[in-house]
């Protein structure tokens, strides 16, 4: 199972870097609750809209650490990543930590919850 989740994190990384809305749509559950770097709560459509509009673009997303905790059909990942890009018109660069909850739906894993914060 850990290898499945590690693979899902890699798929997510590629989709985020490319702002691939179709792939992000498949990876993110419709009920997503996500706390962004600005401490606002985002839903799935908010996240997809940021990518569609170009308000969020990533030029770099290097995964440094991926920790995975399995809980049956649920996985929790703690990811440390070096990022660079633009978020709502503001350029950024630095280390960030993601916390994501993946839920298995049949054969598919989707993100149901998450958050990201800068590592200072």
Image: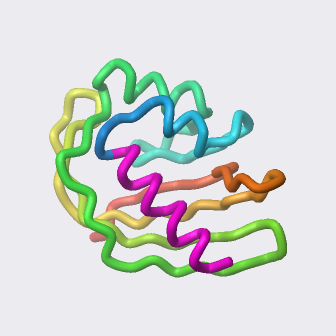
Q: Nearer the viewer, residue 112 or 95?
A: 112
Q: Nearer the viewer, residue 27 or 117?
A: 27
Percent position of residue 45, x then y: 57, 25
Percent position of residue 11, x then y: 46, 55
Task: Look at the image and tell me in which quarter the N terminus lies.
Answer: bottom right
Q: Is 8 situated left or right of 58 in this image? A: right
**Residue 10: which quarter of the image?**
bottom left
Which residue: 38% across, 22% down?
52
Q: Is 35 situated left or right of 116 in this image? A: right
Which residue: 80% across, 52% down?
105
Name above or below for residue 109 compared with residue 15. Answer: below
Name above or below for residue 11 compared with residue 75. Answer: above
Q: Which residues are magenta?
A: 1-16
**Residue 53: which quarter of the image?**
top left
Q: How is the image coloured?
A: rainbow
Which residue: 30% across, 39% down?
18
Task: Look at the image and tell me in which quarter the C terminus lies.
Answer: bottom left
Name above or below for residue 89 compared with residue 1. Answer: above
Q: Is residue 13 magenta?
A: yes
Q: Is residue 108 magenta?
A: no
């Amino acid at each position: 199972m850990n290898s499945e989740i590690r693979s899902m994190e890699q798929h997510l990384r590629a989709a985020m870097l490319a702002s691939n809305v179709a792939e992000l749509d498949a990876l993110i559950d419709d009920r997503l609750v996500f706390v962004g770097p600005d401490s606002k709560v985002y839903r799935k459509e908010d996240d997809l809209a940021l990518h569609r509009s170009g308000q969020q673009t990533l030029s770099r997303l290097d995964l440094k650490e991926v920790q995975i905790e399995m809980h049956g059909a649920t996985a929790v990942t703690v990811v440390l990543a070096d990022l660079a890009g633009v978020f709502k018109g503001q350029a950024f660069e630095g280390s960030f930590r993601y916390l994501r909850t993946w839920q298995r739906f049949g054969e598919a894993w989707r993100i149901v919850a998450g958050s990201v914060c800068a590592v200072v």
